[in-house]
Amino acid sequence: MTLPLPRSRAEVAPGAVHVPDWLAPGRQRELLEAAREWSKPPAGMRRTELSGGRKMSIRTVCLGWYWSPYRYTRVSHDGTPVKAVPPWLADLGRRAVADAYADPDLAAAYDPDIAVVNYYDRHARLGMHQDKEELSLAPVVSLSIGDTCVFRLGGTENRNRPWSEVLLESGDLFVFGGRSRLAFHGVPRTLPGSSPAHLDLNGRVNVTLRMSGLS
């Protein structure tokens, strides 16, 4: 029997921290079941239409604020109010920031009011982009469930090289803030069939938590 090699915590770039296996299997299942509920109408999951009519290959549901290129609103694509960010999810975000940075003050001040939940099937991709619609530059917390993905993190000036690539597996935490808060990032591919059997999931679910700075 070949055992998997241990994966280590790493600071991929200044302020960008990868913590493997942060979510235990049971917590992964709980978060996945919550995501499935959030994805149901009203204010459910959809493929976002970009300028020019092209639709993104990922499917998305938003909590707290609805992201519509390139702004946030309180009303979802179907005209209904956006679902709220549950307190337990905000608490999970604070714990993630605390574990990533070992900074109790930063964690205590972290109060995410946006959750963007993305679903990737085997064909979905996410191009290099910045998360810059928020007024707050508090860290972005990213939680991965299901299929492994290639996560690409670049610089803050443009989408071009150099960049780093990290394999994010189910249960992994990735937090980017500080000098990396406005770094370009994306998901060029996923690894179909790599989701843990206990999840009964084909594809990848990614939950990102953010502070909007909006009122």
Image (spheres, helix red, strand yellow):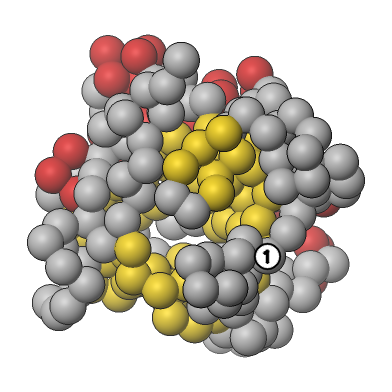
| Image height of 28 relative to 2, above or below | above
User: Which quadrant holds residue 7?
Assistant: bottom left
Going 37% across and 22% down the picture, which residue do you hit? 213
Q: Which of the pair 36/215 is nearer the observer?
A: 215
Return the x and y of residue 133 as percentages of the image width and height: 37, 42
Q: Secondary structure at mark 1?
A: loop
Return the x and y of residue 155 as percentages of the image width and height: 15, 63
Return the x and y of residue 94 as percentages of the image width and height: 45, 25
197 to the left or right of 214? right
1 to the left or right of 169? right
Residue type marked 1: Arg
What residue is pinned by disc 1?
47
Return the x and y of residue 176 as percentages of the image width and height: 30, 46
- Graded by Cα atoms within 10 Å as few (under 14), some (14 to 19) or many (20 or more), the crowding at tag 1 reads some
Residue 107 visible in the displayed image: yes
Going 44% across and 35% down the picture, which residue do you hit? 210
Marks counted in the figure total 1
User: Which quadrant holds residue 80?
Assistant: top right
> Dividing the image into 4 quarters, which one contains the N terminus?
bottom right
Going 17% across and 78% down the picture, which residue do you hit? 160
Residue 4 visible in the displayed image: no
| Image height of 138 relative to 119, above or below | above
Q: Which of the pair 123/33 is nearer the observer?
A: 123
Q: Which of the pair 185/145 is nearer the observer?
A: 185
Specify the farthest residue to the front: 52
